[in-house]
Structure formats: structure tokens, C-alpha cells
Image (spheres, rainbow, N blue to C red):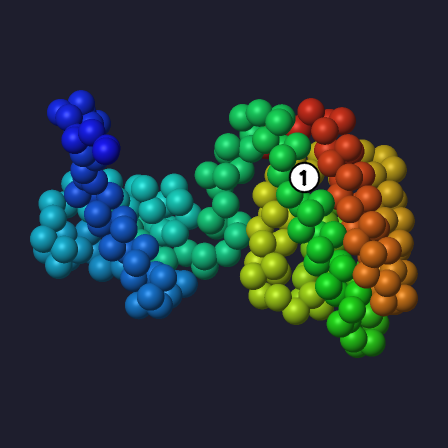
Amino acid sequence: MKSPLSAKDFEAPIVRESVAELVVRRVLDMVKAGVLKPGDALPPERDLAVTLNVSRPSVREAMRGLTVLGVVRTRQGGGAYISDLSPDSLLGPIQFYLSLDQTNIAELYDVRMLIEADVARRAAVSITAEALAKLEESLAKQQDTVSDPIAFRNADFAFHELIWIAAGNAVLKRIGESLNVLGLEFRKRASETPGVLEQSLRDHRALLDALKAHDPEAAARAAEAHMRNVYRSTIKQGIKPEEE
């Protein structure tokens, strides 16, 4: 028979959320429910405090927290609004975490290899002739921009986006997009290293050829090899985002 609870079982303190944390949770719930949408202006601090029946310092602290999360942005001259809620806006805290230890970057690319391989595998089955034609156009743009890292990165993103869409899973697309954004901060200097963009171009060619053949396993292998090459060239630079 199980022994009765003792006082020791209750030693862990009850964690209470601060008023500011409750305000943050309320705003996040409103965003998730669609009550607050990207670009919506938030009421002035004083009005928010009255509406939520909290102090203005608590509202101010909550707004700072929401800003760090990338959910809220402030306008020059005052006023706050809901951000565009894009991966660029929301992934800042994770990018900081990744920057703390190179092991974290390795784990990021480990996940990217898994996701991109599965996305490519799915896309190879269902990709349309129209999507393949767009991928060819994207690859041509990359060929024309190998000497322009910024333009190449834009074309690179568009190339992968077409494949995420072709996979036919909106959640996978969102994950792929987010992982790409996370990796970008550690990729900038590597993309300016001679030979790196040319390697990415070759990787993309191999991936596109596998997609054209509607060969799921070949597409998965090509995507995984590409991510492995991206990781290797990134790590060689000893990237730290704050150095960009």
C-alpha cells in the first residue's frame, strides 16, 4: 500500500506568475485567437492598464517582454503594434541560444537535414511541371548571382520555398522556413567565401534533377547532402552572429 503524503512532498514552492507575465499571456492568447492580427495597433499603455486592471509599470514590463519575443514592435514617436509574426520576427531568442555554443548549431543542422530530406522526399512524389519550371528559373537566377551573396541568398530561399510548398504540408513549410531563417545568421559570412555558393548551386542542381525524376529517395539524399555541405562550410568560418 502506498504511504501517505508527508510534509516533504509539499516543499517545492508554488510558482506564481507576475502580473506582467499574465499580461503577456493575455496578449499572446489574443494573437492566437486572431483577435489581434499582424500590424494591429495596441492601445496606449494607460488604456491597457485600465482595461486589464493592472498597473502601468506591469504593462510596460509586459510590452518589453513581448518585444523581446518578437510579437510586439514599437513605432518611432511612441505606440506599439503586433509585428508581422514572421519567422524573422519571432526567432530572435532561439538565434541567441544557438549562438551560445557551436554544439547548438550542429543540432540545428541535424534537424535541418531530417526536415529537408523528408520535404524533398514528399515533393518528389507530388511536384508539378509548373513547380519544376519555377525551380529551373530559380536555379538560373542563382547561376547569375554567384558573385552577389545577398541576391544569391534571396534566390536560394525562393528555391527552397518552392520545394516546401510542393511537399504539400503547411506545417512542414513553416518549419522549413523557420529553420532556414535560424541558419541564415550563421551562414552570412560563409556565403561570401569563394566556392561556397558554387557548391550550393551544384547541390541544388542535383536536388532538382532528383525532383524531375520523381525519385523520392534520390531527392532525400540530395537534400541531406546539401544540408551537410551547408553545415560544413558554416562551421569552417567559426560563425558568431554578433560578428556579422
The quarter in which the N terminus is drawn is top left
203 left or right, relative to 54 = right
The quarter in which the C terminus is drawn is top right
Residue placed most toward the observer, 9 or 127: 9
Name the secondary structure under disc 1: helix
- Whole-percent x and y of residue 190? 75, 35
- Whole-percent x and y of residue 218? 86, 55
Is residue 69 placed above or below 244 in the rendered structure?
below
Image point (46%, 39%), residue name: 93
161 left or right, relative to 217 = left
Which residue, as the protein is rendered here, is positioned at the far front?
Answer: 1
How many numbered markers are drawn? 1
Q: Residues within 10 Å of mark 1 (few under 14, many from 20)?
A: some
Residue placed most toward the observer, 191 or 2: 2
- Whole-percent x and y of residue 221? 83, 50
- Whole-percent x and y of residue 233? 78, 33
Is residue 222 placed above or below 173 in the rendered structure?
above
Image point (79%, 53%), residue name: 220
Residue 241 sits in which quadrant? top right
54 left or right, relative to 161 = left
Image point (89%, 54%), residue name: 206
Whether residue 54 is visible here, answered yes or no, is: yes
Q: Which residue is mark 1?
A: 110
Q: Amino acid at mark 1?
A: Asp
224 left or right, relative to 90 = right
Whether residue 147 is visible here, answered yes or no, is: no
Residue 211 sits in which quadrant? bottom right
Image point (82%, 76%), residue name: 129
